[in-house]
Image: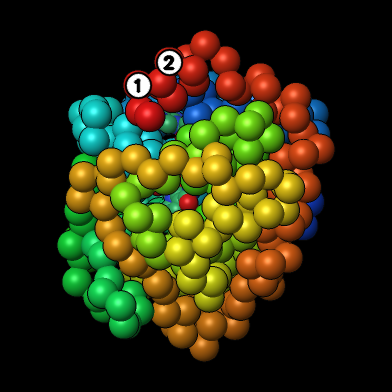
Amino acid sequence: MNILVTGGAGFIGSNFVKYMLNTHDVNIVNLDDLTYAGNLKNLEDIENHKSYNFIKGDICDRSLLEQIFSQYKVDQVVNFAAESHVDRSIENPEIFLQTNVLGTQALLDISKKHWKINPEDKYCKEYKQGVKFLQVSTDEVYGSLGKEGLFTEETNLRPNSPYSASKTSADLLVRSYNKTYGMPVNITRCSNNYGPYQFPEKLIPLMINNCLNDKELPVYGDGMQIRDWLHVKDHCTAIDTVLSKGLDGEVYNIGGNNEKANIEIIKLIIETLGKSENLIKYVKDRPGHDRRYAIDNTKITNELGWEPSYTFEQGIKETIEWYLNNSEWIKDIVNGDYVKYYSSMY
Ligand code: NAD
């Protein structure tokens, strides 16, 4: 099996590439444009693996995609490549549409062309066996929940940020390539991930890094926004499960059954690192900030037999230890550009 992983130098993608190479006999081509969020250091331990190739490039570059599909005989695509940070999408939505929507469409088009049994037939609905396009999406496409209830795959799509609107648009395109052209696709919608190699603009690594450096911990609004935390390794096993068992055209929600308020997590990190809650600084809330996300896992659990293996207590402990043991990795990231970004935000 030849798998094209896009965005494989980012947080989740790099964990996925390593997980697949360590557990399956597959060839992986990692296409990543190495934006501020892409980091080849995430992949140092497998960079010389015989079944792994890295290509630096943009998913919007159709001629590069053509070349990759022809050279590597791609059977499956797992599309992680995206602009992924909500705050950045509020400042500059355009690049989010470029990568998340048009990039996904370019990948769909080239996949369609290379996978059709009869490439001359524009609307051919027969595809080679074993091919699949898996779109890695987010629960943010569903918008925000009140105090009760969970997102199911049937929940209406109501994105509230330019980021989630771009991911929703991509999901709809992926769906349309299945309905119109019969293309074999799955969409996975997961909750907030945490674990090793996450860029320190996101809540958990940001708070760990600031705590370690005795810097203020900026908390949006009252800090009572609730997220359903999923360990990245559980996310990898879920994607693997959907790749091998997911039914054609289906959407699967993936969650960790770990609802936590942001402030609860921040206080846990402070306590674990032996710091003071005086570091907490409440700042103006993010515009359009979703209040609560929570995932109903029933479909993937009952139909495909996947379950998360991490409790939040175990996962956060390991994650904090990982950041403590990998201070060089984080120091390399927190460079000039990051400092500029950080000071413009808080
Ligand atoms: P990330 O920002 O850490 O990584 C994104 C990667 O995509 C980077 O390596 C970057 O260089 C690459 N990239 C960006 N634009 C590109 C382009 N035009 N061409 C090629 N590569 C490009 O993101 P992540 O947290 O690993 O998220 C991966 C996917 O999972 C995204 O699609 C995101 O929407 C989705 N997701 C993430 C979370 C989460 O909690 N992190 C939750 C739900 C869904």
Q: Quadrant of residue 180?
A: bottom left
- Quarter placement of the C terminus: top left
Residue positioned 36% across, 67% down in the render: 293
The reply to whether residue 198 is visible in this rendering is: no
Residue positioned 52% across, 88% down in the render: 302
Identify the residue under disc 1.
344
Q: Secondary structure at mark 2?
A: helix
Seen from the viewer's position, the closer of residues 38 and 29 is 38
Image vertical order of residue 122 relative to residue 262, above or below:
above
Circle number at residue 340: 2
Seen from the viewer's position, the closer of residues 334 and 237 is 334
Callout 1, which amino acid? Ser
Seen from the viewer's position, the closer of residues 17 and 110 is 17
| Circle 1/circle 2 CB separation < 8 Å | yes
Image vertical order of residue 154 relative to residue 179, above or below:
below
Seen from the viewer's position, the closer of residues 202 and 219 is 219
Residue positioned 73% across, 65% down in the render: 314
Residue positioned 64% across, 67% down in the render: 312
Residue 287: image x %, image y %? 21, 45
Callout 2, which amino acid? Lys
Q: Secondary structure at mark 1?
A: helix
